[in-house]
Amino acid sequence: MSTNTERSRGPAIRVRNVEKSYKELHVLKGVDFEVARGSIFALLGSNGAGKTTAIKILSTLLKADGGTASVNGYDVATQAADVRESISLTGQFAAVDEVLTGRENLVLVARLRHLANPGKIADDLLARFSLTEAGGRKAGTYSGGMRRRLDISMSLIGNPPIIFLDEPTTGLDPQARIEVWDAVKELARNGTTVLLTTQYLDEAEQLADRIAILHEGRIIVNGTLAELKALLPPAKVEYVEKQPTLEDVFFAVVGDSAPGTGAGNVGDPAGSPVSSPVSTDK
């Protein structure tokens, strides 16, 4: 079997025992996970858990102190150039030029990547993300959700097979969040692999095929939403069964009390909010 065939059949992302420290602060303490091709994988964790550090290592912006990681079959330490050609990274805030129109932003990126027919590339992406009518307007006039969709569309120029989304809906209103969720689902439908970090538990519930919780530098649980919910027994209120939410699972496995639960009895429906942010991982 050729190397290219092995690469195409293996996981899009593979992380094995990755460690990273900043002087005395041990941020990652042996992280392991895999992301299947064409899937959406959500990495959850409290503030300082190491989510963004993991993303930076996978996107070759940081070097790990130990362990191995591969992206699209390329080792992030020894084949960094190949990794960068395989990925796109979208940070917590939209990186669009507000003076340019939406279409001009896309054309500019396509030209910087020396791609043929930048105008057609821009028009196709505007149509794909429902921005055609706004394409001639300055990006500075866009709503938060439109700016984020434009930012994601810019990340797709060159058709990278893997995209990292670091807290993509931070600071957005509910309607804008839904717009971004739809854009992320569209990515997966078109075969793009998405590694998502988020501070919103309901976001992971809505989007992810698999969810991993990173706590104190380690992955402490990893599975589908159904598998994670199965970790806790359903609560019963007046003989009505209530399935545990992802929030119940999160606070049970990290050992903290959920916001507003008082004594912190995980699975107590009277004290568990439907959805609340964990915290932003800087």
Image (cartoon, rainbow, N blue to C red):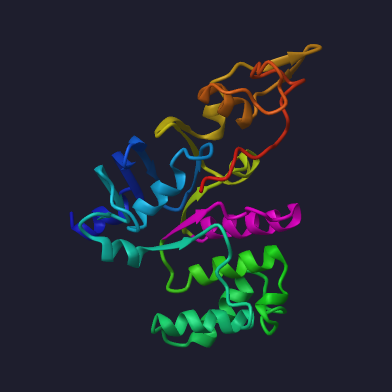
Q: Which residue corresponds to the image point at 62% horizontal and 23% vertical from the top-left?
A: 257
Q: Is residue 36 visible?
A: no
Residue 281 locus on image (x, y percent): 52, 45
Residue 125 locus on image (x, y percent): 57, 74
Figure check: 193 above or below 140: above
Residue 114 locus on image (x, y percent): 39, 84
Figure check: 172 above or below 273: below
Q: Which residue lies furthest to the top in this view?
A: 239
Q: Can residue 54 be seen in this view?
A: yes
The one nearer the camera, 65 or 128, is 65
> Image quadrant of residue 217?
top left
Figure check: 58 above or below 240: below
Left/right placement of residue 29 relative to residue 276 reads: left
Residue 83 locus on image (x, y percent): 31, 61
Left/right placement of residue 55 relative to residue 254 reads: left
Q: Does the magenta stretch include residue 160?
A: no
Q: Which residue corresponds to the image point at 68% horizontal and 85% vertical from the top-left?
A: 136
Q: Residue furthest right?
A: 238
Q: Which residue corresponds to the image point at 57% horizontal and 23% vertical from the top-left?
A: 256
